[in-house]
Amino acid sequence: MGTYRMMSRTMPDIVVCVKQTVDVYQLKPHPETLAPQLSQAQWKNSDFDLNAVEEAVRIKEKSGGKVVVVSVGPEVKQLLVRECLAMGADEAYILSDPSLAQADGAATAKALAAVIKTASPKWDIILCGEASLDQNAYQTGPRLAEIFNVPHVSYVNKLEVGDRVLKAWRAVEDGVEVVSCSLPAVVTVGLEINTPRLPSLLMIRAAQKKPLKELSLNDVGLTKDDLMPRAETLEVKALKTERRRQVFEGKVEELAEKLAERIIAHMGGRR
Amino acid sequence: MEPIRETYILLPPGTDFLMYLVLVPFALVFVFGVVYRLRRLGVRSVGELLNSVFRGVGYMARYGLLQRKVVSEHLAGVMHLLIYTGIIALFIGTTLVFIDHDILRVLGLRLLRGDFYLGFEFVLDVMGVAFLLGLALLIYRRFIRHEPRLRNRLEYSMALAGLLFIGLSGYVLEAIRLTVEPRPWSGYSFVGKAVSTAFFVNLPTEPLTLLYRGIWWSHAIVAFAMVAVLPYSPLGHIFSTLLNIAVNAPRQLPLGKMKTPFRIDELDPSADIKLGFRSLSELGWMEKLGLDACTDCGRCEAACPAHAAGTPLSPRDIMQKLRRQLWRSDGLDEDVFASGLIDEEEVWACTTCSACIEACPVLIRPMDYILEMRRALTLEGKLDKRKTAMLTNLSRYGNPYGFDQSEKQKFFEELAEMGVQTLEEKPDAEYVYWIGCASIYDARGREIAKSVAKILLKAGVSFAVLGVEETCTGDPARRIGEEGRFQELALQNIETLKQKSVKKIIVNCPHCFNTLKKEYRDFGLELEVKHHSQVIGELLRTGRLKLTKPLSEKITLHDSCYIGRINDVFEEPRFVIQSANKDGAYVEMSRSGRKSFCCGAGGSTYWYEVRRTDRESVIRLREAVETGASILAVECPYCMQMFADAARVTGVDQSLKIKDIAEIVAESI
Ligand code: SF4
Ligand code: SF4
């Protein structure tokens, strides 16, 4: 990594985009239709986005600056946004509109960009989770960079911010790639970058003192038409999995052999 | 000639005056030290101090003056009693001499005369011997036997030398006096007389008198000096421990109850949030006094399971480190974690077993300090993955495992098949059987719950379960320091229980027991909570439960912390086991009852890992194996899991079965 030295003279303003999703681990498909039963599901902040918030707060703890949380969606829950504030973010902006229910990456990015332009036009870094817990589309971050016409670094699992530059360690297929770029920039982070702190309940309550503002489409200069998804989701279904319920009998050695055969057969015969 | 005390004999006239002159600076140093020490602790006024002391005189008499807990360790106890009663007796003796010589004599009266004087001389000689014997024991423990928990420091050796000198020189003085000025009643001072016969008779009077004067002054000056440095030295513990007992004992919560620092439902959201402490300046003077009173005796460390398991934690080190911090110039304001004084792992390693509290001879509670530091850490939320996951699970799913509702439902369906009804189906049930997460979600724990259910059904106890409405009591959240999430769960449970007018509860989990019984009180719910061992015991005593298939095993019992030491249930589990095991034998482990050793799961440590070289569970299991028992009986589902794992790791799972007492009873029905 050489003698690259980070100077931290800037106090970066960081915007973190946080999506609220249903808790997919709790999601139960309807026994017949296999459609996920959204009405029973619990909502939470998407895991990757919490990593983004944590990273932003850590940068702030080191270099100063400000952390602004932005969340858009059909029905953004204030309590969950407050959790991000309790983690150490300074202010939050929410855009709730039913038209975002079907939003794809493009529409979401458009909405986020509009909020950012209105609420925090002078930013240095936008941090996002590399994907969302529910859709896993890996779209929002790159599209935001596109809209703002700034560099974009994805799959980051280590980040250093210096004077108008950042240096990022990217997890790529066959190793780690270290890149640097000038600010402003958009960065998407993965789960490995940190362990998000868990704000205590007391902290979450205390975060009520921090500014949290609800914006409307009108406030940010958007119309419903701007948010029409480019792709249409026809149906969402759970994969039906079933155990094979095979029972092997015999001595331990034989059993092991039989089991191994099965596994090999299942993997397509490759040993 | 009537026997009478001849003070300042062999000394030139005016010595008494000179002595008082010499005493003055020492006295000033002493007073300054006491004031400095109290100021440093943050005592604001003498009135406040006296007020607190006054409320605790009873405790001070029992645990301070009579040393009720010090003597629980025999050799140490005898040693302390000898030294301490010796010092007190000699001090009273000197005071009497002062009254006699400097007050009464001036008024033309005398106290130390006749038979009273003879008795006085005799008793003082006896007490002097006791004092020296105590010092000999001290030397034996520290320098010959080298008791591992005792640390040797220069200050300790100097204090010892000073005390030895005072004791021995006292006898030498007496001996010379009796040699130079023999009296018919000198036999009452039997030690002095003996020393005189052995060393001084037939020696010329002149040099003896000179020697006497030299020793007299050095005796006096060493004694003054020792008193003067008391407030600055380890022996100062004589005062700070007494003070600590008086001040802190009356306000201590019962074991198992944590301080409730706020109520989340009454909290003003704009108020400053503060929980626990990260620097000593956040402690009140009473808490600081507790630190100051720690004598570094090491009894807490010797009892601490986390220390035995090679984690970074030693309750004594925590107390001593904080105590030293108290006296460092900028120590009060320094963050104990940021400065590196305390390692976070020390704080996380505590299983809240309360053994340190039980062990401390001077009623200090190291665990309370540890848990308050934990609260401060958790408040900030920078926890590792496992702790974060457990707390997230609690908020999201109402159980620390992170299982969803359907798992719970499944188990209650199994119970329903056995004939267990929910409170909804049986609203007039006398008891609610509160099962607890460890027995709802864990496969092994479920067996315990089924055995309890089987017993209750068999005995015809009127009971019901809450079913899916049962959630975690919040215990793991409270012990990990997340007071807010604990209260959230507690308030929700209390509402459920109140709504259903639940008054009596049966549990098989000691942690549920403690929380429901002791912690929920602070939130307005008084419940009659019974551990299953108590319920089964009662059923057996009243004959409502008959055991027809007596076992013939060799059984030993592991007392869980939260049923045993913390909640004083010792007899019932033993009675139950013995009733079921009529044809077998019952054996105790080397540490049992109040002195039992934690399995390593308490205080929510079950849910995360701590740096360590050994495991509490493995250490304890070895003790069980040593008894030669065929069954290790437990009374807690977490103990069960810990020992089951330990047995697998150490390979004794074939020879030693681990069973809950409910399972043992269920087998013999
Ligand atoms: S409560 Fe138990 S584990 Fe914690 S410090 Fe005291 S003895 Fe050690
Ligand atoms: S806390 Fe109590 S038991 Fe522990 S070292 Fe101090 S005085 Fe001894």
Image (cartoon, coloured by chain):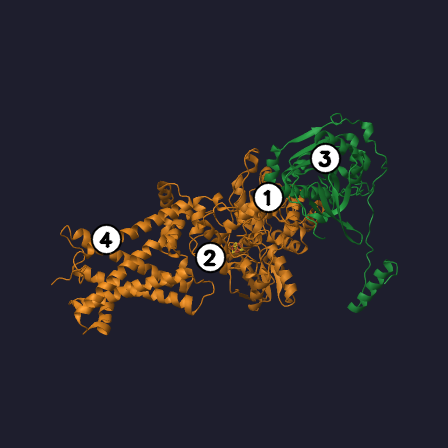
The residue sitting at the top extreme is A218
Which chain is mark 4 on? B
Residue ID at (37%, 66%): B137
Nearest to the eye among marks 2 and 3: give it. 3
Nearest to the eye among marks 1 and 2: give it. 1
Earlier residue among tags 1 and 4: 4
Q: Quadrant of ligand 2?
A: bottom left
- B527 vs A62, nearest the viewer: A62
Q: Secondary structure at mark 1?
A: helix
CA distance separating discs 1 and 3: 24 Å
Residue type beneath disc 3 = Ser
Chain shown in orange: B
Mark 4 CB within 8 Å of ligand 2: no
Q: Is residue A104 in sight in this rendering?
A: no
The residue sitting at the left extreme is B1
Query: Where does label 4 land, which residue?
Result: B20
Chain A shade: green
CA distance separating discs 1 and 4: 58 Å
Earlier residue among tags 4 and 2: 4
CA distance separating discs 4 and 3: 81 Å
Query: Where does label 2 land, which residue?
Result: B359
Quadrant housing residue B616: bottom right
Mark 1: give few (<14), some (14-19) or many (20+) Cα within 10 Å: some
Seen in the image, is B109 located left or right of residue B217?
Answer: left
Which chain is mark 2 on? B
Q: Secondary structure at mark 4?
A: helix
Residue type beneath disc 2 = Ala
Residue type beneath disc 1 = Glu
CA distance separating discs 2 and 3: 54 Å
Mark 2 CB within 8 Å of ligand 2: yes
